[in-house]
Amino acid sequence: MIKIYLDDVAPGHARPQKTAERCDRLLDFFGHRRLDEITGALCREYAADRYGKGCDERPGGNRGKGGGAKRDLEDLRSAINHHAKEGYHRGVVRVVLPERGKARQRWLTRDEAARLLWICWRTREVQEGAQTDKRPLRHLCRFLILGLYTGSRPGAILTASWERGPARSWIDIENGIFHRHAVSLRRGPPFQNRWNRAKLRS
């Protein structure tokens, strides 16, 4: 069922590779089960398991979040609906999603953002106990400036181009405008920025 979804539907997504990664997680948990075994209790079990493992299983790595499980289960629901629409099964199979997480209550202050940028700009690489002239974090400054001034998601920033092109977001440095890729009604219009264009060129 999920393979059919990956073959038929995922290629039309804005980021097919991310869909494939979510489906891999779904297969790890649901792959040995039949459709009639999918229940609300099993979906909640998946969400709890996803929260415990997260994407980074290294010691001290980031734990999973309820939003991640919700997005995974949305793909499972879409895969089941596509499977039914194509006539591969009869009956209704419901996927229960976790509750929406609480809205963010805190953002970086101006001083905190400035300190983060300063650290990324000034940090030097250390080799054999001695500082070198290499600045391994400077490339993050552009990323942080775009994120702070536009409020764009990391994925939108990482996939943006410096040149205009079909079906992709791009950054007009001369006029200071971030043209977002309009995939759905939820995506915002081009964003007029207050960034210093010299910072992006450096």
Image (tube, helix red, strand yellow):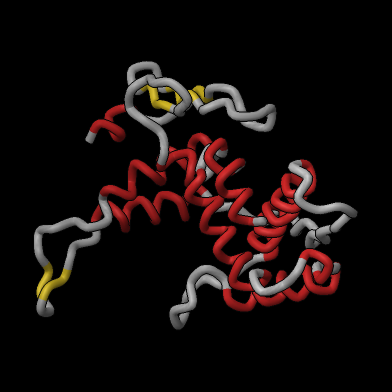
Q: Residue furthest front?
A: 88
Q: State the residue in front, 130 or 127.
A: 127
Determine the residue positioned at 44% across, 79% down: 58
Examine the image and state in which quarter residue 188 appears.
Answer: top right
Asked whether, in this view, residue 170 is left or right of residue 130, the answer is right
Residue 118: percent from the left, percent from the top?
32, 53
- The answer to which quarter of the image holds residue 23 is bottom right
Position above or below: 9 against 21: above
- x and y percentages locating residue 164 in the rendered image: 38, 20
Which residue lies most toward the top here? Answer: 175
Residue 71 percent location from the top left of the image: 67, 55
The image position of residue 159, as x and y in percent, is 41, 38
In the rendered view, does 96 fall on the left or right side of 3?
Answer: right
Work out whether 126 lies above or below 115.
below
Q: Nearer the viewer, residue 86 or 68?
A: 86
Q: How many marks?
A: 0
**Residue positioned 58% across, 66% down in the render:** 25
Residue for point 56% across, 36% down: 12
Left or right, 27 with respect to 15, comes to right
Which quadrant holds the C terminus? top left
The quarter of the picture where the N terminus appears is bottom right
Residue at the (49%, 77%) spot, across then down:
57
